[in-house]
Image (spheres, rainbow, N blue to C red):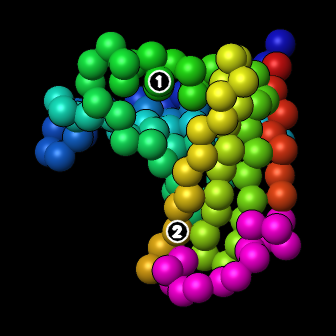
Amino acid sequence: MTREHVHNYPKPDLYDVVVTIEPVNPASAPISWIASDVDVVLSVGRGNWPRWELALDDLGFDELDNLVKAAIDGRVRETFGWHRSFVEVLHEDGQVERSTGGGLLGLVPLPGWKWWGRHVRYEPYA
């Protein structure tokens, strides 16, 4: 039986908790989230930090739960481009959530990168 690596780092300054889940299978999507007393910032995948910013209410917790379950079940695709990445997460009900992340150089226009970039379909955790 394999076990995923979970790190929980208390951060008393800006954020209360940082959680990182690094799967044993390198073909699975890592998950991390940062929680404060106001919101949760969730990142899924290995790219330039595409993320979801979720409120700390029932709707935000449901969304966090759905996104984490989708990553664990292997329902995540990521496209990598120059200093940017694009993540698609498929929910159980068929709804698709999308997020694009990148650094400062990711703001440079790069036409068509989502089509010719490197595509990865992540595997389930177990």
Per the image, the residue denoted by label 2 is 102
| Image point (66%, 83%), residue name | 110
Give the mark toward the camera: 1 or 2.
1
Residue 100 in the image, given as x and y percentages of width and height: 56, 58
| Image point (74%, 74%), residue name | 113
Q: Quadrant of residue 82?
A: bottom right
Per the image, the residue denoted by label 1 is 63
| Image point (68%, 44%), residue name | 88
Give amino acid for label 2.
Answer: Gly
- Mark positioned earlier in the residue sequence (1 or 2): 1
Residue 4 in the image, given as x and y percentages of width and height: 67, 25
Quarter occupied by the C terminus: top right
Give amino acid for label 1.
Answer: Glu
Q: Note whether residue 4 is visible.
A: no
| Image point (66%, 35%), residue name | 96
Helix, strand or loop at label 1? It is: helix
Q: Nearer the viewer, residue 59 or 20?
A: 59
User: Which region is colored magenta?
Assistant: 105-118
Q: Is residue 3 left or right of residue 118?
A: left
Q: Quadrant of residue 69?
A: top right
